Amino acid sequence: MRVNFEPCLMDDVQQLMQDYLRGLSSPFDSFLEEHIVSSAFYRITEEPGEMGYFAIHENGLLTQFYIRHALQMHAQTLFDRVIEQYAVKSLFIPTGDELFVSLALDKSYVVNKQAYFFQDSGTYTSGSRVRDNETFRLAVLDDLEQIQRVCGDFLDAYERRITSGELFVYYREADLLGIGIAERSKLLPGLASIGMFANEAFRRQGVGTTIIEALRQWCAQHGIRPISGCWYYNDGSKKTLEKAGMVSRTRLLNITTHLG
């Protein structure tokens, strides 16, 4: 079998990527998505057509590996070849990607738990946690200075996020309690990654839970499925997301190869 690995653009493997995305048991959030879309893509070909594709982020991080279903009897051999030929040091694998997980677990690699991925539970509390003297709304440019002062480098490009309509503010009168974000997926239509930042002066008052609940309600009103994620060892964020109605059945694994 004469197989070639050909550098390509992500757009060149759109049909293969759609097949891959349809096969996932659950979605992934913007953290992994950003690593995927900024990776270098390679098409796996054998005359007369395509077998699959893979993608490598800077410093040897494998973010995608997909072989067409009918050709997956070759997956182990091709996976080994990619690891060796491109000196792959580590792999980002969502546990919803059964093939990728299985191929990595076939090897004697070190498995580290990177993050939780969350989905909407579909259950909603009656009413809103936002009180009469509080406001939750889309951010406007007049909010920019206070957002930067309160949130620091929590996010990049605050101005762009405001103008693109993905940043929200939560005020109690003139005090900025925190911000929310709903970042639409570039790969998964109809989904948005939601998250929040609570002002340090108002933490442990339910601010984060209120923001996530409000973002879920906003998504429901706009026909969007909310997803989210947090670092695996951030117990506070995990509890906030769960209290606000998000559930997790998927993990992001950071797997180190023998070349790492």
Image (cartoon, rainbow, N blue to C red):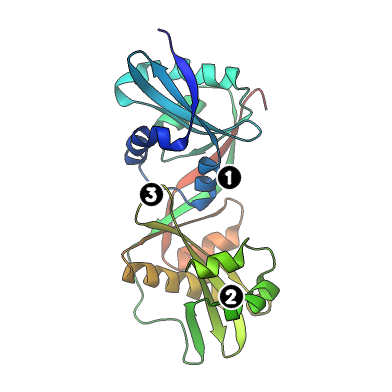
Q: Nearer the viewer, residue 249 or 181?
A: 181
| 181 w.r.t. 204: above or below | above
Q: CA distance from mark 3 to mark 2?
A: 27 Å
Seen at 40% across and 33% down, the residue is 13
| 96 w.r.t. 201: above or below | above
Seen at 70% across and 75% down, the residue is 149
> Where is residue 14 drawn, in percent x and y?
37, 37
Q: Quadrant of the N terminus?
A: top left
| 225 w.r.t. 7: above or below | below
Label 1 crowding class (10 Å Cα cut-off): few <14, some 14-19, many 20+? some
Q: CA distance from mark 3 to mark 1?
A: 21 Å
Q: Secondary structure at mark 1?
A: strand
> Where is residue 235 drawn, in percent x and y?
59, 58
| 150 w.r.t. 173: above or below | above
Q: CA distance from mark 2 to mark 1?
A: 25 Å
* Badge 3 amino acid: Leu
User: Badge 3 is on which residue?
Assistant: 188
User: Badge 1 is on which residue?
Assistant: 114
User: Badge 2 is on which residue?
Assistant: 178
Q: Nearer the viewer, mark 3 or mark 1?
A: 3
Instruction: Please indicate whether residue 124 sits to the left or right of residue 108 in the image.
Output: left
